[in-house]
Amino acid sequence: MADHASPSPQDTKGGASARKPRPKHAATHKGQSRIASSVHQAGGRWPKLRSYAAIDLGTNNCRLLVAKPSSDGFIVTDAFSRVVRLGEGLVETGRISSRAMDRAVAALSICADKLRRRNVTLARSVATEACRRASNGDKFIERVRRETGIALDVITAEEEARLAVLGCQILLEPGDGPALIFDIGGGSTELVLVDTSGAAPEIIDWQSAPWGVVSLTESERFDGDDPVARREAFATMRERVTESFSSFADRLPRMEQCDYRLLGTSGTVTTLASLHLKLPQYDRKLIDGLIVPTESMRDISAMLAEATPDERADIPCIGRERADLVVGGCAILEAILDIWPASRVGVADRGIREGILRSLMSSNERGVGR
């Protein structure tokens, strides 16, 4: 879906489709993941303890997980994450810049080295909104393959939503009625309505909106030191996101006697959860699976929107690198809370990479066990 145009609120995609962890099931959905690369096989036989890897190259971050199967899922043996801002300037130019490419290739080279050193049996590497939208996305993908050996699979927004659900669904609270899972990315936000009444959560409906923390921030330039400009910019951001969510919001069920369950996976929700706990530094063990009252999320969001860039940068769990992006994330989160009035928000520090790993292990371990 390469696109020369800047993201617009109308450019949305979606449609219907067939702290207490749920049983380890995979979200059901039409279509299967395509494995992008197989990187190691020893002597024609699978090693006793196979290593799998997942790379998620997003609009803002490059992330890697290496893991081995275990009786209750998998054990992570290596991980890597780096802010690469692949989508920097994409809103204005429709292209991935040379500097952004350089940053991403450098990060992916580290990932490739880890794959080799960990003797990874099977890997899948995916790219999302920035590569879908950029007019020169194909050239970037070829450069990555040539310089790192990694074959990036540019997945659709629908596949991105499916993998995010597969990776974090175990953290959904038990309850009646459908639940909403969301993933605030750098270039897009995925909203997925799931039915949890069966043995495995089933995707009922989904939508991908073209606003993520990078695309939304770059669409609204303002003087961060001017309090009036900050308020006006935040209001405009919320309006843009709300408009992009409107068709999905119209399709959402209105429930009177059922609780609205909500689970989010993104840097925005994990950051706000860290501030809710007043952590001096980020701690995944305390955040992944946390349930935060919606009122607290809204209060923290309002505080960050009012703060100056320097004030946000001084917050340990945010830092200067993400101080400009967190406001856009807050605008997106508040728009989600408006259309799905949950009393609390589940927080997941897991998503696409975990979804890839579960998918790879599920299909390959069954084949090996035959």
Image (cartoon, rainbow, N blue to C red):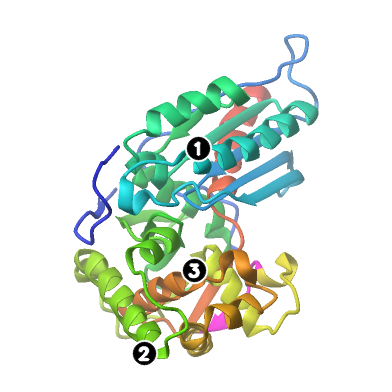
Residue at 37%, 75% in the rendered image: 222
Locate residue 353 relative to residue 117 in the image: left or right.
Answer: left
Locate residue 155 relative to residue 143 in the image: left or right.
Answer: left
| Residue that protrudes farthest toward the top in the picture | 43
| Percent position of residue 147, x then y | 59, 23
**Which quarter of the picture shows residue 111?**
top right
Mark 3 Cα-neighbour bin, 10 Å: few <14, some 14–19, many ≥20: many
C-alpha distance separating marks 3 and 2:
32 Å
Under tag 3, what secondary structure? strand
Residue 93 or residue 305, whichever sits in front: 93
Q: Which residue is mark 2?
A: 228
| Percent position of residue 348, x then y | 58, 64
C-alpha distance separating marks 3 and 1:
23 Å
| Percent position of residue 290, x then y | 63, 74
C-alpha distance separating marks 1 and 2:
40 Å
Lower sequence index among marks 3 and 2: 2
- Residue 126: which numbered mark, if any? 1
Image quarter in which the N terminus is found = top left
Dot 3 amino acid type = Leu
Residue at 46%, 29% in the rendered image: 141
- Residue 56: which numbered mark, if any? none
Under tag 1, what secondary structure? strand
> Is residue 53 rendered magenta in the image?
no
- Magenta highlight range: 288-293
Residue at 57%, 66% in the rendered image: 322
Q: Which residue is mark 3?
A: 263
